[in-house]
Amino acid sequence: MPRHRSRRSGPARRPRRPPAEYRLVLEPNRIEKQYWRDLWRYRELFWILAWRDIAVRYKQTAIGVGWALIRPLLTMLVFTLVFGRLARLPSEGEAPYAVLVFSGLLPWQFFSTALSSCADSLVDNANLLTKVYFPRLIVPAAAVISSFVDALIALAILAGLMLWFQWWPSWRVLSLPFWMILAFAASMGPGLWLASLNVQYRDFRYVVPFLVQFGLYVSPVGFSSALVPERWQLLYALNPMVGVIEGFRWAIIGKGAMLNPAGFWLSMAIVALLLVTGVRQFRGMEKRFADVI
């Protein structure tokens, strides 16, 4: 009989545990507890989606990124001709009317582009939402961030326009990053409301262009806020973009720019309210996105 050599069995080796970022733990309400931490863990997906939106926006167009130059320039020319030359509306301080218009058009273009992209972001990424888990807040946030590219191009046009008119800004221009962050918050709040509602009610896809077009004429883009009667200033400031646009002009035009303190803080309160309630509305509907979309 052949002898079988007995193997001495050593201590059993424990399987190596994967790193914490790749470990899946099933725990009740874990997603709710770790949601804001997951936003940081999935930051790479955030940048991937933002870069994809930037690359796709002007893909297969003859002019390409030139559209980001043409749209604000043509709008500025029309507003300057209609309000500045024909209606002869006054500017703010001693600034040329074209600088007044473009300094209001810059935040408005960012707001309108970001709002439209944010409202359609979840529906446009339906395949992604139904397959894998990640914090859904990443999708509309990436859509808003991608609109910064157009804003930076418009900022370069504004710099060239100021050189053309030899209009030199004061130290207030250093506050522009703050006003850009404020414009981001002003577009993110209503954008989250529209993005979550658009998943369940597709009618909002047709409402958004109307809101953007209507908001252009009730916001001080082509004219100065000083033209609004004083008794209507607070009511007018309920439009959150009033404070944002006035802030941009305060930073760019400098002396003589209209900035109503009471109206400004009221606009900022509306921006904060829309942002907080927008996040709560989005988080409340987030669990049903994959089923409804």
Image (cartoon, rainbow, N blue to C red):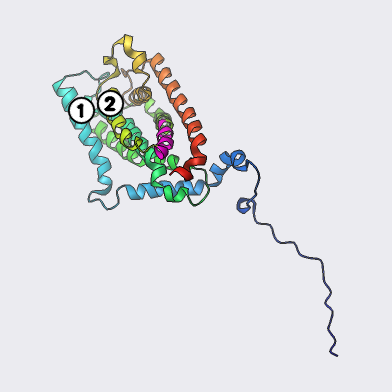
The segment highlighted magenta reads: 190-200
Q: Earlier in the sequence, mark 1 or mark 2?
A: 1
> In what quadrant of the picture does the C terminus appear?
top left
- Amino acid residing under circle 2: Val
Determine if the magenta segment contains residue 8: no
Residue 167 makes an appearance in the image: no
- The residue depicted at 49 percent of the width and 52 percent of the height is 131
> In what quadrant of the picture does the N terminus appear?
bottom right
Q: Which residue is mark 2?
A: 221
- The residue depicted at 25 percent of the width and 27 percent of the height is 101
**Where is residue 202 drawn, in percent x and y?**
36, 38
Closest to the observer, 275 or 74: 275
Residue at the limit of the structure toward the top, as seen here: 231
Tell me the chief SS of the magenta region: helix
- Amino acid residing under circle 1: Phe
Q: Are marks 1 and 2 in contact (CB under 8 Å)?
A: yes
Residue at the limit of the structure toward the left, as seen here: 86
Say what secondary structure mark 1 lies in. Answer: helix
**How far is the residue under mark 1 from the one under mark 2?**
9 Å
- The residue depicted at 34 percent of the width and 36 percent of the height is 203
Say what secondary structure mark 2 lies in. Answer: loop
Which quarter of the figure has residue 103? top left
**Where is residue 89 drawn, in percent x and y?**
20, 18
Residue 88 makes an appearance in the image: yes
- Which dot marks residue 79? 1
Q: Where 113 sits versus 1, above or below?
A: above
